[in-house]
Structures are given as C-alpha cells and as structure tokens.
Image: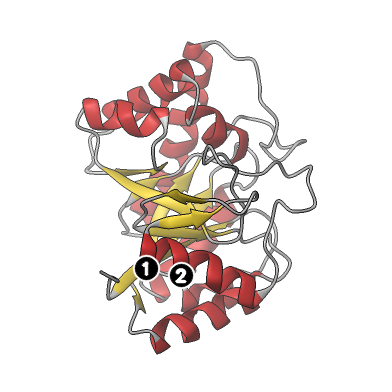
Amino acid sequence: MIPNAIDINVDVGEGIGNESQLMPYISSCNIACGGHAGDIDTMRNVIKLAKEHRVKIGAHPSFPDKVNFGRMNMEMSCAALFKSIKGQVDDLIHVLREEHRNLHHIKPHGALYNLAAVDEKVADVIIEVMKAMVLPVKLYVPFGSVIEKKAISQNIPIINEAFADRNYNDDLTLVSRKEASASIHNEDDLFAHIFNMISKQKVKTITGSYIEIKAQTFCIHGDNPNAVNLIKNLGIRLKSHGIQIR
C-alpha cells in the first residue's frame, strides 16, 4: 500500500548556502553542528529558516574532520568519539533553546553514518549518545543495519532512512562516492528510484537487482549540485501520485 505522506530530509548548514531555496520543499533537515562543517552562526541561521518553514530539525554530527568533510573514516577511541558527537549535538541544542525550538532527531553524517551501519563499536557509541539525551529524540538509521538492530534492542526510537539521490549496492550499502554512478542527478531517474522504494519497498541496486528496503524518511543531499531542482520536481511528481511531503 502506497503511503499518503512521506518525510523528505536534507543535510544543511554545510556551507553550500542553498538552505533558503530548499526549506519550502522539505519536511525535515539535518544541521551540520561543527564536526565536518558548520558553526554557531550557521546553525542559528539555518534554525531560523527551518522555524519559518515549519521544518523538523535534526543534528548532523560527524567525525571531527572538516578537511575531508567527514567523509573519511577516523581512528578514535570510543570515549573520544562519544565526547565529539555529544559535544556537537549539545552545541546545536544550545542554539535551538535560544531559538525556542526542539531537536527532533539525530542523523550521523558521511563516514560516521556508513560505519555505524556495519561496525558494532561505532554503532554502540552513537547509541550511548542517544541514551545520554534527556529529550525524546529519534535516530535516523538505514534499514537492516547494525545500528538499527542495536537501537531497537535498547528501545531507542528510530526512523528508517533511505537515500533518494544515491545508488545502492546489493548489500544495501551506498555505492562509493569514488564511483561515477554513486549519485543520481537526473529528475526522472531520482523519481523512479524513490517511487520504487515507496510503492514496492524495494530498491533497484547498481546491478539491476531489486532488494527489500523500508524507509519513512528519504534524503536528498544539500550539496548535490541539482538539489533544489530535484526536490521541486520530486514534490510535484509525488503529489500527482497522492503523496504529500510532511
């Protein structure tokens, strides 16, 4: 059964500067909070835009690596990684309180997100950050991942996420950004990709196979060069199929 509404999320506050163009068309956002990008000023500016457009706000912590935009794995002790992630989230919460807004979710970024999907130690650190929160915050996780299973086992509220503008391998990992086929830039291709996931709960992988996937939120990367046009077009085409973005 095709749902009548889905959530579209975008990574923002990463220095691209297109947030004002994106916010009218999305329903949740993930704000970079100092690890791979962003600072207090950018957090505040993006929060104000999200507030104006009634967009749910999430924290987007990463490995503390602005040089590589958080897209390279880092060797860190569990204690150091916990401190870094918790500090990033706390910084965003501080600004949210100043702006009288609440934190809706946490979504790790880049290499941290991908590693937590398959690595138990990294997943455990993120789970511990969630357990340290005194707020009813959700965790965005990929379907069938290590971090999904750990979160469920420890009663951490989750929302399954899939990527509208990224291609998948047969094991549901994302195609490496080193490959030309990693990202989807064409509006027709993106709609077909996401509509398969919404209507059939299957994703067409890079090999042409159809693999089961479940998601309630779908990400389009804010640094995709065609992000604004992709999201505008996607919203129009989803509505034509009776699916709202909210």
Between 196 and 208, the one lying in front of the other is: 208
Find residue 195 and name its label: 2
Q: Report x, y in % for residue 107.
A: 45, 44
What amino acid type is highlighted by mark number 1?
Ser
Q: Quadrant of residue 5?
A: bottom left
Disc 2 is placed on an element classified as helix
Where's the N terminus, which quadrant? bottom left
Name the one closer to the observer, 229 or 101: 229
Residue plotted at (48% across, 77% down): 25
Q: Is residue 38 left or right of residue 95?
A: right
Q: Examine the rendering and report whether any part of residue 110 can be seen.
A: yes
The answer to which image quadrant residue 221 occupies is bottom right
What residue is shown with label 1? 199
CB-based contact (under 8 Å), mark 2 and mark 1: yes
Q: How many marks?
A: 2
Q: Which mark is residue 162?
A: none
Quadrant hosting residue 233: bottom right
